[in-house]
Image: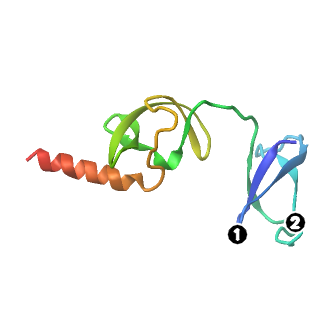
Amino acid sequence: GQPVTLAAASGGPAATGRIARVNVLAHSNQAVTARAVLDNSGGQWPPGTYVTAQVTVATHQVPLAVQRSGLQAFRDFTVVYAQIGDEYEVRMLEIGRQDGDRVEVLGGLEPGTRYVSNNSYVIKADIEKAGAAHDH
């Protein structure tokens, strides 16, 4: 079965497992019932718990991917802020496939380049403020 990540609708930590069975009978609301096998040794998943699930249907190896949290919109481009020495530079990206956490980079960034992966909006704000100061 496919890998699956489950999160209880009521909150709490997520769990990973594998799909063991899928009910293929069609429902009027297009819902599908699936059974997943996961470690419940701590009893945190009582029967009937409502969950959301992310099922991995395929995996692809890509040469370069960045954290989605590092992406920013800058003018008409999707960018990351690359660390070059003690400074940060805007790198315009050509992007490809995406999943929940990562985005494939097709161009604009070399493998191994350090980039801001969290709180990149702070650098974006600093760059925009500096640009606004030069407009006056």
Identity of the residue drawn at 60% across and 30% down: 63
Q: Earlier in the sequence, mark 2 or mark 1?
A: 1
Identity of the residue drawn at 86% across and 70% down: 46
Residue linked to disc 1 = 12
Residue linked to disc 2 = 40
Q: Residue furthest front?
A: 85
The alpha-carbon separation of the residues under discs 2 and 1 comes to 14 Å
Check contact, mark 2 vs mark 1: CB within 8 A: no
On screen, residue 41 above or below 95? below
Assign a secondary structure to mark 1: loop
On screen, residue 20 above or below 93? below
Q: Position of residue 95 (x, y in %)?
A: 50, 31
Front one among 41 and 25? 41
Task: Report how many numbered discs are placed on residues in the image.
Answer: 2
Front one among 113 and 25? 113
Q: Position of residue 116 (x, y in %)?
A: 44, 49
Query: What amino acid is found at the position of numbered circle 1 in the picture?
Result: Gly
Query: What amino acid is found at the position of numbered circle 2 in the picture?
Result: Asn
- Horizontal arrangement in the rendering, residue 56 relative to residue 85 (left or right): right
